[in-house]
Amino acid sequence: AQSVWGYDSDNGPEHWHENYPLAKGDKQSPIEINSKDVQHDSSLSPWHASYDPGAAKSILNNGRTCRVVFDDTFDRSVLRGGPLTEAYRLRQLHLHWGSSDDHGSEHVIDGVKYAAELHMVHWNPKHGNFAGALKQPDGVAVVGIFLKVGKTPKAEMKRILEEIDNIKTKGKEAPFHHFDPSILFPKSRDYWTYHGSFTTPPCEECITWILLREPIEVSSDQMAKLRSLSKNAENEPVHPLVDNWRPPQPVKGRIVRASFK
Ligand SMILES: NS(=O)(=O)c1ccc(C(=O)N2CCN(Cc3ccccc3)C2)cc1
Ligand SMILES: [Zn+2]
């Protein structure tokens, strides 16, 4: 049977286009951002998130990432402003990380790879539902936050990392309530924005990316905790869930705008 997509040599990013032709599109993500090519856009307004902690539902290991899902059946937790003209509903957050602290992020900034990258995924309710939104160029908005390894553990990440022990293997899910993900935001609201795609198959080009310039700091122990997740199901051979990142894709003439000088 065709191997399901993943991040290994036989089913990784170089193979995705075989089953998902969009993966070879002109607006793929992630990309490498070079400050010299970025255009400052003074018309970009600040972005605002107003999240209801009660919308958090559960945390799960789907064998490819650790994901927290939220109730998105109404405008309960929304992102607005910045490059967005409407309010987008928070649906889920997840992470991409490496097998060691020196790599793991998907976007690369001036050659710098961070240890991990956290994605907060929102969709535009004018398109009815998530499935409809991912068919539209303005269907989805993802806030990307870089995780940098330093001395201080990010207290706000503890909530997520404490749950890791309950979702060690693929298919495990645990209740996850009373969580406002805006506590994960860094101090600065500075961001880059460009139009791109899901960084996983089917790689639809429906995403307005909002990448925060200021990374949040996590400890090496916190990264080790993330790396203790397994991509296999219980009582299957153990395969660590690490290096679940897609490498940068061709920019193909796209403009990356910055909200800051
Ligand atoms: N790394 S990223 O932020 O670019 C990102 C990647 C994938 C997804 C994601 O949840 N899906 C992509 C399509 N997929 C299939 C799907 C599911 C329900 C309805 C319709 C289709 C879901 C969200 C964000
Ligand atoms: Zn992602």
Image (cartoon, rainbow, N blue to C red):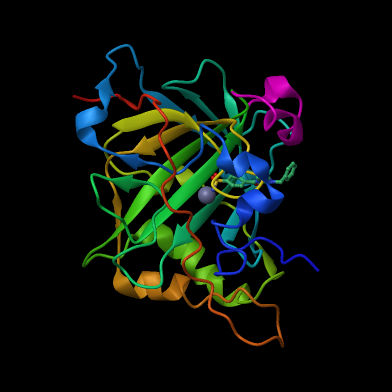
Question: Which residue appears farthest toward the top when viewing the image?
Answer: 43
Quarter residue 10 falls in:
bottom right
| Quadrant of the rendered image holding ligand 1 | top right
Asked if 120 appears above or below 105 in the picture, the reply is above
Q: Is residue 261 left or right of residue 4?
A: left
Question: Residue at coordinates 26% horizontally, 27% vertically from top-left?
Answer: 38
Task: In the displayed orientation, state which residue is furthest to the front.
Answer: 18
Residue 57 falls inside the magenta stretch: no
Based on the displayed image, in which of its 4 quarters is residue 100 positioned? bottom left
- Closer-to-camera residue (70/22): 22
Quadrant of the snapshot with the N terminus:
bottom right
Where does the image place residue 5, in percent across and percent down from the top left?
66, 60
Work out whether residue 67 or residue 3 is closer to the camera in this orientation and state it. Answer: 3
The vertical placement of 92 against 221, above or below, is above
Q: Which residues are magenta?
A: 124-137
Q: Is residue 62 above or below residue 192?
A: below
Image location (x, y in percent) of residue 182: 44, 42
Q: Residue at x 46, y 66 (%)?
A: 243
Q: Is residue 173 in sight in this rendering?
A: yes
The front one of 199 and 57 is: 199
Q: Quadrant of the C terminus?
A: top left
Residue 82's x, y, as percent? 41, 22
